[in-house]
Amino acid sequence: MRPTGPALRVTIFIGENDTWHHKPLHSEIVHRAHAAGLAGASVFRGIEGFGASSLIHTSRLLSLSEDLPVAVVIVDTEERVRAFLPQLDELVAEGLVILDDCEVVRYVGRGPKEPR
């Protein structure tokens, strides 16, 4: 994806204990997105939530959960995101994958760090 304009956001809602070949699933998704040349991916850990199982997972002290909700968010051009969807079909056995149209208004990376 290059600087600005129409884009597609894919958000993958999974549990932090979900795995792929003994590795955290969210990490596998991020690494595959990177290998696919997507513009970027971020993982967000939720503090409370529930999904298809209807079990509430929370970080509150009295009912500490070891499987908090996690969202992986990827934004790139529609073409690139849609090309990546078959990998998500392979990886996400339980969870929710959603697509949203969006508009990128600024996409600037950090340049090389200058010596102090």
Image (cartoon, rainbow, N blue to C red):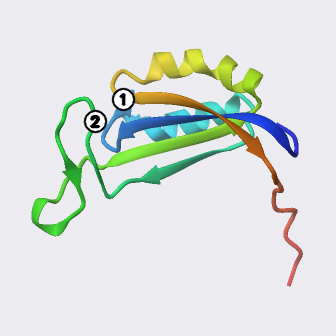
Quadrant the N terminus occupies:
top right
In the displayed structure, 85 sits above or below 50; it is above
Residue 24 visible: no
Residue 82 visible: yes
Image quadrant in which you'd find residue 100: top right
Percent x, y of residue 71: 46, 44
Q: Residue at x 69, y 43 (%)?
A: 40
* Residue named by callout 2: 51
Quadrant the C terminus occupies:
bottom right
Percent x, y of residue 108: 83, 56
Q: Nearer the viewer, mark 2 or mark 1?
A: 2
Q: Nearer the viewer, residue 88 or 82?
A: 82
Q: Is residue 72 left or right of residue 13?
A: right
In the displayed structure, 116 sits above or below 3; it is below
Return the mark for residue 23.
none
Q: Is residue 30 left or right of residue 76?
A: left
Image quadrant in which you'd find residue 13: top left
- Identify the amino acid type marked 1: Gly
Percent x, y of residue 39: 75, 40
* Residue named by callout 1: 95
Image quadrant in which you'd find residue 16: top left
Of mark 2 and mark 1, the one earlier in the sequence is 2
Disc 2 + disc 1, Cβ < 8 Å = yes
- Identify the amino acid type marked 2: Gly
Q: Residue at x 38, y 37 (%)?
A: 14
Q: For the residues marked 2 and 1, what is the alpha-carbon distance in whole angstroms?
A: 8 Å
In the displayed structure, 66 sits above or below 11; it is below
Q: Secondary structure at mark 2?
A: loop
Q: Is residue 1 left or right of residue 31?
A: right
